[in-house]
Amino acid sequence: MRNRWFAVALFPVLALLGSDAFAQTDLTNATSFRIRSNPAGDRHKVVARFRDVPLLAIPDCANPASVRIVTSSGDSDELPLDCGNWQTLKFGKYRYKAAAADDLSVQRITFGDGKLYIKARGAAAALLAGSESFAELRFSVNGDRTKYCGRVATLAKNTTKKLSSRGPTSVCTAFEAERAFWDTLRLVDNRETEAVALFEQAVTEIPTDGRAWFLKGMFHMYRQSQTLDWDNPSQFVLDEVDLAEDALFEAVPLLPADVRIPGFLGSATYVGGVTHNDAARTQLALDRMRDAIVLWPLFNIFNFAGTVGIHVPNTDPLFAESVGYVDLGLGSGCSPFTDPEICGNAGRAPHNVEGSMMLFGDLYAKAGDESAALAAYQLGIVFDDTDAIPYIWRAELDDRVATLPARIAAYQDADPLNDPLIIGEGNYENCLFCHGG
């Protein structure tokens, strides 16, 4: 199965989708933002207008659109938009119209020509406590790809019945935290300290923001991985992995549709179990990762392989289980043509293929499978040769091909101290080997 998959995948790939099509954009000019509540506080009318709004994407049915209204004391959660209710107007404008409903829902949106108008009304949990420190309107045009957020903190009216503001509009904390996250992982700018503070502020301000909890957890995983020593972890590593697990645990129930997060939670739990020398926590991690594989096999099998497989000896049954998951994923038929984000470079990881193939090749080399390891490394090289963005760890791939027999021999002898590090192991470029550059 391995060789058949690689034979197909090694055909030249000449049209990679390598650009980052994601954007978190602040709405910087609120001309008005009003929330009205009935005396009971359980029904609301929200009207917001913004100017100077860039048209970064158009509404379509390929990805879900939604609106979210958040105050310092309440959260509407995602209000989904029916893609069939969009109309294309003249001069690059788009209109959304929907009938009123009992629950809080969006009735009207006008988007385009530098403007955004949104009206929503209906029953919802209380949004106004009478002493709000901010209010936010979030507008997702197509899932997580293009999102807008407008926050007002200067409030003309601020009671249990009415909140109003004409600006100025301030930066949304969660959006700035996300930008700092990706700037750091993409090696655009080292904003690590800033990202940590912003994520802590974001989840303190809005404890129901599942995405902020999720990315907070992932960023702490990144931080602990940079100096991880499995056998002699520093206090910094122990603290960071605990923060990662706690944040991902919070994210799971807040984002139940995102079936990646249980797998990442399992990975964080595993590192925590091993580094804290906690057998029960390690077993919980294995259970979590296996349960996550049931939720989404193609994605979550690699959480297991990339965490457990790089750590345990190649004689451990858990290592054989890890390599079996790699076989399963590579034999699935997923490719940059069938799923350019998960199995290509079109998503948040601009070198997903090159980095993944280095990891898979390392695992196959650790297993003693020279042909599968070589095929994986060569596939990574093919993608780098055709990619518009050079892979900054290309020398690592070339070296692995040149030294593969010696690499395998080191794994197979009786001395574990001479085993080459697997990409992502310890502090060896974890996260960055796919996301960096």
Image (tube, grey):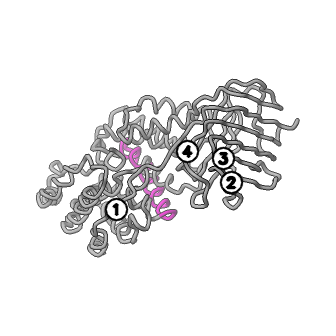
Gap between marks 4 and 1, in whole Å?
28 Å
Q: Is residue 124 left or right of residue 293?
A: right
Q: Residue furthest right?
A: 39
Mark 4 surroundings: few (<14), some (14-19) or many (≥20) residues within 10 A: some
Residue 89 is tagged as 2
Q: Residue at x 77, y 55 (%)?
A: 98
Which of the two discs, 1 and 3, labels the residue nearer the N terminus?
Answer: 3
Which of the two discs, 2 and 3, labels the residue nearer the N terminus?
Answer: 2
Circles 1 and 2, Cβ within 8 Å, touching? The answer is no
The residue beneath circle 4 is 211
Whole-percent x, y for residue 48 in the image = 72, 38
Choose mark 2 or mark 4, whichever is in front. Answer: 2
Q: What is the secondary structure assignment of the residue under circle 2? A: loop
Whole-percent x, y for residue 68 in the image = 67, 44
Choose mark 3 or mark 4, whichever is in front. Answer: 3
Q: Residue furthest front?
A: 91
Choose mark 4 or mark 1, whichever is in front. Answer: 4
Mark 3 surroundings: few (<14), some (14-19) or many (≥20) residues within 10 A: many
Whole-percent x, y for residue 50 in the image = 67, 36
Gap between marks 2 and 3, in whole Å?
10 Å
Query: Which span of residues is magenta-colored?
Result: 270-296
Q: What is the secondary structure assignment of the residue under circle 3? A: strand
Which of the two discs, 2 and 4, labels the residue nearer the N terminus?
Answer: 2
Q: Nearer the viewer, residue 62 or 232?
A: 62
Based on the displayed image, in which of its 4 quarters is residue 276 positioned? Answer: top left
Count all numbered tags in the image, as a single digit. 4
Residue 322 is tagged as 1
Q: Residue at x 63, y 29 (%)?
A: 169
Disc 3 marks a residue whose amino acid type is Phe
Gap between marks 3 and 4, in whole Å?
24 Å
**Residue 277 lies within the magenta run:** yes
